[in-house]
Amino acid sequence: MASSTATVAAPAHDAHGHDDHHGHDHPPHLKHYFVTSEQQFEAAKLGMWLFLVTEILLFGGMFVAYGIFRAWYPELFAEASTQLDTVMGATNTLVLLLSSFTVAFAIRGAQTDNQKVLFWNLVATVALAGVFMVIKYFEYTHKFDLGIFPGAAFNPTSDVVNPTEGIFAHPRAGVFFSIYYVMTGIHGFHVLIGMVAISILAWKARQGKYTSAWYTPVENVGLYWHVVDIIWIFLFPLMYLI
Amino acid sequence: MTSVDHKRIGIMYLVAISTFFALGGILALLVRTELAMLGDTIMDADTYNRVFTMHGVVMVFLFIVPSIPASLGNIIMPIQLGAKDVAFPKLNLMSFYLYVAGAFLAILSLRTGGVDTGWTFYTPYSAETGTAVIAMGMGVFVAGFASILTGINFIVTIHKMRAPGLTWNRMPLFCWGLYATSIVQVLATPVIGITMLLLVLERTLGIGIFDPALGGDPVLFQHFFWFYSHPAVYIMILPAFGVISELVTTFSRQKVYGYTAIALSSVAIALLGFLVWGHHMFTSGQSIVSSIVFSMITFLIGIPSGIKIFNWIATMYRGSVWLVTPMLYAISFLFLFTIGGLTGIMVGALAVDIHLHDTYFVVAHFHYVMMGGTVIAMLGGLFYWWPKFTGKLYHEGMGVASAVLVFIGFNMTFFIQFVMGSQGMPRRYADYPDLPWLEPLHQFSTIGSYVLGLGLLLVLFNGIWSLFKGKPAPGNPWGGASLEWTHTTSPPDPHNFSRTPLVTHGPYDYYTVFNGAGDGAMGDGMGDGANRPAPVPVITEGAPQEFDKQIDLGTRQA
């Protein structure tokens, strides 16, 4: 509050007080309704954290559904998870962890005014996210080839999968894969949104828009990306390992 | 329409929600008209199902959830905080357009035959019925985003945008109410979002999460649904508590009694509200233990609600109560909300609920809370702040008449429904051939609903009249002491304040503002604490401070 009091004590300007035109220099990024850059940065960051809380709750609903169905059909879930490709899942986990690392480095680059570090780390993050999506694509298409579709279309028939044996004979086998598709699908959608957002950041970073004086979007998209990563960290063991 | 000014967005929201309130109201009148007589009178049972579903969906998702926060909250809260705008003006505008898009999707469902599931969309019926559940579900999903954005915006605004000196315990109680509301909006709305998404996937792909035929669990849907929709009840009522706190103190000319208790009880209700969703599901087959726990926590909610009621009454006690339209609505609220709250305790009791579940008793209970609580408070707040944001005074006589008509009409419509419910009238039935003795009671209720509609029309007419014929409003027509009254004109400057206010006293320190030694006496008064003047001139004739004087001199006529 100390800094804002200074503005109050400043000499009163014209009666209608359009504060955005009165003499002393405002940084170009500072919106007229904020008093200081710190206030604006803190506000944006708090807003982002609150948004991330809503993301956690959105996925929370699906994790609850997962938990309930797992409690109902434990042997089905334990068996069905062996159908998922652990190597691909683990690779994807490493890819996302690495991308969290690069996005953190990008923020560091912005804070230290190192445009090269900022730009190339953003590019690397988008690239890693792309790798994640490609691997996911191969996983999905492989499942589709086996007839393992979500929901009512679930029809596992091929040379590899015998619908009368093992977990595929289980009358509720489709539910596990439905939950798998819904959760990883919505997660994948978040990855796509993150790729778009980070691409825009990279494009603007190229133009030198972000400096240590103002890098709020980099910070906030970085936070978002970490949450997308964390959700996968929970999805991977629940779906693939146990 | 592309302005990012919080006041304009608030007014856009106000117009939009009023439109949907009118639509929902017309549907309600159709429902009441059908029920006035035995047999199919104006519609068949299928149409009836679609009409009451649309009434519920429009009223809940398009009117009452955004009602007070998005309209009055948007217009007034930043001014009460001494801020120039909300923290994210563009998100605020986006929230409005998301709301419009959600509303559009919901209306679109009408074109493809409407929805007949009730506003609760219970599975498995909602997964199988031939009506437009997908469009409606997506409409609710999109409108939910609008609600989340408003919540995030308000929390950040309250945390980061308060004027210097406006500490948490100097914040007007309306802002406290909105703060508690926003917490619920942010924490609960994503869950209805994912629920609607899963419901849509259930219908399109048959993912089998809710449909028992596919191995799913319909009770899980109820848990998800009420995990949002019970807290959503507090999204609806907490801002109303905030409005009532403002009205009671301003028109009693007394510092609010138990400021901290009222402020924190809002937050307590917001948090406890997350732990009671199971009381909607006593008959759904959930375990006895969870029913008992949910029932106990439901009773706990009565404590903070009771604290508020008693504090408001204590605020009025020995105050100079000024019976103008907003105060009449506030007093109506105290009656109606108390009835709504106490009947809530009744249906929260396990044994009683088994008897009353899904009857008109429940219908009457939640209308007493939602309409008797939120809508009445919103009307009171609308009359209270109308001069501030339009710059025009409304017609007092018409205002009083509307308050009386609404109070009488509301009670006629819904009090009798408690009786019908306890006699076994089930909700959502188009006809009651087995209960013919209820016909006169239904007719009484229907007539009441017409009186209520008339009262609401009068409110609308009063508003339109005032815009053209109303006298220009002074900056502080009520002698309020919070920033929107003392530090800005009516209507407010586009930047809200000519300079950022420095707050040196609480929001209800009438004595300091209007009678204190320093009021205007110390010139500029910068930096010398309590002596800072209120820059907006205080009206002198017919205003509450005259009552104060009359009481002091012993000349006041009762």
Image (cartoon, coloured by chain):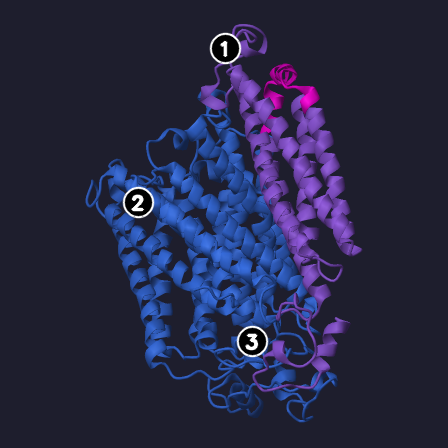
Q: Is residue B90 above or below residue B484?
A: above
Q: Is B77 on the left or on the right of B419, as rendered?
A: right
Residue A150 at what x, y percent from top left? 50, 23
What separation in Å lies between label 1 and label 2 (alpha carbons)? 46 Å
Give the distance between the C-alpha atoms of the residues marked 2 and 3, in whole angstroms.
43 Å
* Residue A103 can be seen in this image: yes
Residue sitting at 76 percent across and 59 percent down? A212
Q: Amino acid at mark 3?
A: Asn
Instruction: Tell me: residue B396, above or below residue B127.
Output: below
Rendered purple, the chain in question is A
Q: CA distance from mark 3 to mark 1?
A: 68 Å
Nearest the viewer among B509 and A228 is A228
Q: Amino acid at mark 2?
A: Val
User: What element does badge 1 sit on?
Assistant: loop
Question: Disc 2 vs disc 3: Cβ atoms closer than 8 Å?
Answer: no
Membership of A71 in magenta stretch: yes
* Residue B186 versus residue B380 in the image, above or below: above
Image location (x, y in percent) of residue B61? 44, 49
| Front: mark 2 or 3 | 3
Q: What is the magenta range? A: A65-88
